Image (cartoon, rainbow, N blue to C red):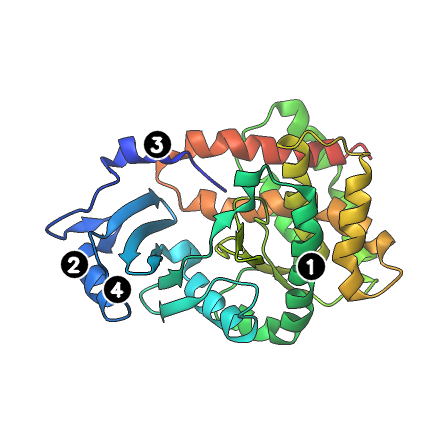
Amino acid sequence: MRLPWSSLRRRNGLADKSLAGGGIVGGVDRAAAEAWIRAHVEPVGAIETAHQRPWATVLRVPLAGGVAWFKACSPVQAFEPRLSAALFARWPDRVAEVLGCDQELGWLLLADAGTPIGVSGNPPEAWLVALPLYAELQRGEAAHAGDHLAHGVPDLRVAALPARYEDLLRRDLPLEPGEIARLRGFAPRFAALCAELAAHQVPETVQHDDLHMANVYAQDGRLRLLDWGDASIAHPFASLVVTFRFLEQRNGLRPTDPWFGRLRDAYLEPWGGGLAEPAALAIRVGAFAHPIAWTRQRDHLPPAARPEFDQEFAVVLRRAVARTLR
């Protein structure tokens, strides 16, 4: 869920320079944030605003050996610092190193994780490595799903989806009337698909829900998964909805491209055999769960930001509409 950085900077009067003198930026007390950062690391230069969005403000912190990244999460994703720290404690080889975390303030300080794989063109070969690592993390985190829910990670478990779908349909959606009618008519079928998916009894766990080329980083031959602010507790296989979408849109892969089967199988391997059917079902259900998840950020946007957000939201919704015909 992203808005262009440039428009946000223009709208909020931001520049990519240190905001000397402190002040409140994006709801963050800059002086307090810099003092907190300096309690964890020793900056060697000006701390600069990397970007500001309605759901988070990120600062770039120059260090002697590179950089660190400070993230101040808004209340809509206040769960992210604790979730990131918990994942790093258990999976330090595949997520960003957490240098500092304050759950009450919603602040997070991360070590640099390298370069996003999107810089290299989002190669499918990288996903052959990243997806099994991610699946192993998901399997391990299933035992902690209840704890994550108790600490604010959104609940998008399959049992909750039919009611959440009905809630989606009650909203003012950026779609044409005919498209909304198709979604309404699909509601009974969606509930049936959810019941069918639940019957496979795949354990629900942390689901990144924004797993694309800008959130997988490469450094020293290792891949790391970043940016857990869109995560939920949900069906794990629905993670492939976003990954596959960007391989279609950014890489130009057709839905029938053999790469999708290879990547699905690589992802499923840590889960065991015989899961192609529930995976296909989860991807179909996930195409509807994904726009449901977007409503969380949308509900917390300032009015001026919603039209730009809705441009991308409409794309996600229309991909769900297309799934009503299959």
Determine which residue is flagged by label 2: 31
Marks 1, 3: nearer the viewer: 3
Does residue 187 show up? yes
Q: Which mark is residue 236?
A: 1
Q: Amino acid at mark 3?
A: Ser
Q: CA distance from mark 3 to mark 4?
A: 25 Å
Image-based side of 27 in relation to 202, left or right: left
Distance CA(mark 2)–CA(mark 1): 40 Å
Q: Residue at x 39, y 49 (%)?
A: 55
Secondary structure beneath disc 3?
helix
- Which numbered disc, 1 or 4, marks the residue that appears first in the sequence? 4
Q: Which callout, 3 or 4, points at the residue further toward the start of the chain?
A: 3
Which dot, 1 or 4, sits closer to the camera? Answer: 4
Q: Residues within 10 Å of mark 4 (few under 14, many from 20)?
A: many
What amino acid is at disc 1?
Pro
Q: Of marks 1 and 3, which one's residue comes earlier in the chain?
A: 3
Circle nearer the N terminus (2, 4): 2
Residue in the image at 78% along x and 58% along y? 268
Query: Is label 2 or label 1 in front?
Result: 2
Instruction: Mark 2 or mark 3: name the one nearer the start of the chain.
Output: 3
**Mark 2: which amino acid?**
Ala
Residue drawn at the location 59% of the way across and 42% of the way down:
291
Horizontal side of 53 relative to 197 (left or right) equals left
Q: Residue shown at 57%/31% (left/top)? A: 314
Mark 1–mark 3 distance (CA, rounded to whole Å): 33 Å
Is the C-beta separation of discs 3 and 4 under 8 Å?
Answer: no
Would you say 158 lies left or right of 19 here?
right
User: In the rendered image, which residue does mark 3 sit on?
Assistant: 6
Label 2 or label 4, whichever lies nearer to me, is: 4
Residue 185, above or below 194: above
Q: Nearer the viewer, residue 64 or 296?
A: 64
